[in-house]
């Protein structure tokens, strides 16, 4: 469903007095102007404060990393340090990523684990610093006391609303005169300014920065510093697999060059008949073992970047009664004037479900 700028449950309700609803005008604007907003669609509710807040929670983590560069014998040492020992319990079976060896945790002292190597008949293998450790599970003993309580704390997150405005002014002569290709000069000016506001809204949703003074919306890129990936030469099946396996993305957002990279994934397998008159080179959906992702091209994302988003955790919300509308203003002369106004915020939940890849090769670089 295209983005109309209104919360769906309030569609058709009356805006404040003297304000003209312009959601119908938004509906006829080309989705190429706001591809991400159209992919996300209208929110289910409105924001009720200029600082919109929500709660986030996560499951207890089931993996950690080795934080130990001192080994006597990496294949037989029974103690080593990890980044966060609170994630482990006595009795946990653990396994290093890419290894067939299973270990049994017999003691946890702060961040130091004591383990049984080669548990259950597996073969001990060398361990190294920064290796990922998966927690397979814990077997409780029959009749045992309850384990120590472990839980996560809900986190209160928020974002500010941002006001988008544009003035519209048409002289009395223009209002009265016939216009080529136009029925009404005022309506035409409303549509033009509204296109600009929607373009600005989409660009702010993607790239908006949280300010220190002004009340502005924080954008998607600014929410993802901890999920930013670098060092990837170009967009590939392997990179997409790596990102999708670590999150829950269903939306890939790229600029023009990276979209051509995705289109080229299946170029070798395309065929055309002798009578075909249409050349098609487009991938709109990327389907893999890790899920189905829509591919969205936007002008406003840097060409060296790719966003992997979970659209179910993202909403662009209007402040209650402040979706885009036109408010006529009193003129002080021979003209009609008014103001287009809209106030919106971005609700961006669980950043760990999303990812941002930066530093990809661009059109000016050689891709090998």
Image (spheres, rainbow, N blue to C red):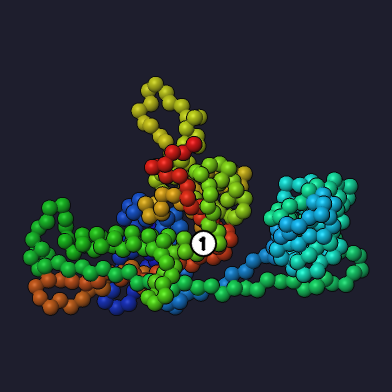
Residue 9 vs residue 355, the one in the foreground: 355
At 25% across and 60% down in the image, what residue appears? Answer: 191
Residue 166 relative to residue 146: left or right: left
At 12% across and 71% down in the image, what residue appears? Answer: 335
Residue 89 relative to residue 37: left or right: right
At 90% across and 64% down in the image, what residue appears? Answer: 141
Q: Is residue 64 above or below residue 10?
A: above
Q: Is residue 280 visible?
A: yes
Residue 185 x, y percent position in the rendering: 16, 61
Tally the marks.
Answer: 1
Residue position for label 1:
224
Q: Residues within 10 Å of mark 1 (few under 14, many from 20)?
A: some
At 47% across and 62% down in the image, what residue appears? Answer: 220
Residue 50 x, y percent position in the rendering: 42, 77
Residue 293 x, y percent position in the rendering: 53, 48
Q: Is residue 270 above or below residue 1?
A: above
Q: Secondary structure at mark 1?
A: loop
Q: Is residue 303 above or below residue 89?
A: above
Residue 90 vs residue 367, the one in the foreground: 367
Q: Quadrant of residue 60?
A: bottom right
Q: Residue furthest right?
A: 143
Residue 123 x, y percent position in the rendering: 85, 45
Residue 332 vs residue 2, the one in the foreground: 332
Residue 282 relative to residue 17: left or right: right
Residue 298 relative to residue 113: left or right: left
Q: Is residue 161 visible?
A: no
Which quadrant holds the N terminus? bottom left
């Amino acid at each position: 469903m295209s983005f109309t700028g209104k919360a769906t449950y309030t569609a058709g309700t009356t805006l404040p007095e003297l304000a003209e609803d312009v959601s119908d005008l938004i509906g006829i604007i080309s989705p190429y102007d706001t591809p991400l907003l159209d992919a996300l669609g209208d929110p289910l509710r409105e924001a009720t404060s200029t600082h919109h807040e929500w709660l986030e929670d996560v499951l207890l983590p089931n993996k950690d990393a080795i934080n130990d560069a001192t080994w006597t014998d990496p294949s037989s040492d029974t103690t080593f340090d990890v980044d966060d020992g609170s994630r482990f319990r006595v009795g946990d079976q653990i396994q290093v990523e890419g290894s067939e060896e299973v270990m049994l945790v017999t003691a946890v002292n702060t961040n130091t684990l004591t383990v049984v190597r080669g548990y259950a008949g597996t073969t001990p293998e060398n361990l190294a610093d920064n290796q990922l450790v998966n927690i397979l599970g814990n077997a409780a003993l029959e009749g045992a006391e309850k384990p120590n309580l472990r839980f996560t704390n809900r986190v209160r997150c928020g974002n500010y609303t941002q006001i988008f405005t544009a003035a519209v002014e048409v002289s009395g002569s223009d209002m009265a005169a016939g216009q080529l290709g136009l029925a009404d000069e005022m309506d035409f000016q409303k549509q033009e300014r509204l296109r600009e506001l929607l373009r600005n809204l989409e660009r702010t949703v993607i790239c908006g920065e949280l300010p220190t003074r002004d009340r502005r919306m924080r954008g998607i890129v600014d929410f993802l510093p901890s999920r930013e990936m670098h060092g990837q030469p170009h967009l590939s099946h392997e990179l997409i697999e790596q990102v999708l396996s670590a999150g829950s993305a269903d939306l890939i957002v790229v600029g023009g060059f990276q979209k051509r990279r995705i289109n080229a994934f299946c170029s070798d397998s395309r065929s055309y008949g002798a009578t075909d008159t249409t050349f098609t080179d487009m991938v709109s959906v990327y389907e893999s073992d890790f899920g189905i992702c829509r591919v969205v091209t936007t002008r406003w994302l840097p060409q060296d970047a790719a966003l992997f988003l979970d659209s179910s955790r993202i909403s662009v919300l209007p402040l209650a009664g402040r979706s885009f509308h036109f408010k006529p203003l009193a003129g002080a002369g021979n003209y009609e004037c008014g103001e287009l106004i809209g106030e919106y915020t971005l609700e961006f939940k669980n950043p760990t479900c999303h990812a941002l890849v930066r530093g990809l090769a661009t059109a000016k670089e050689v891709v090998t």
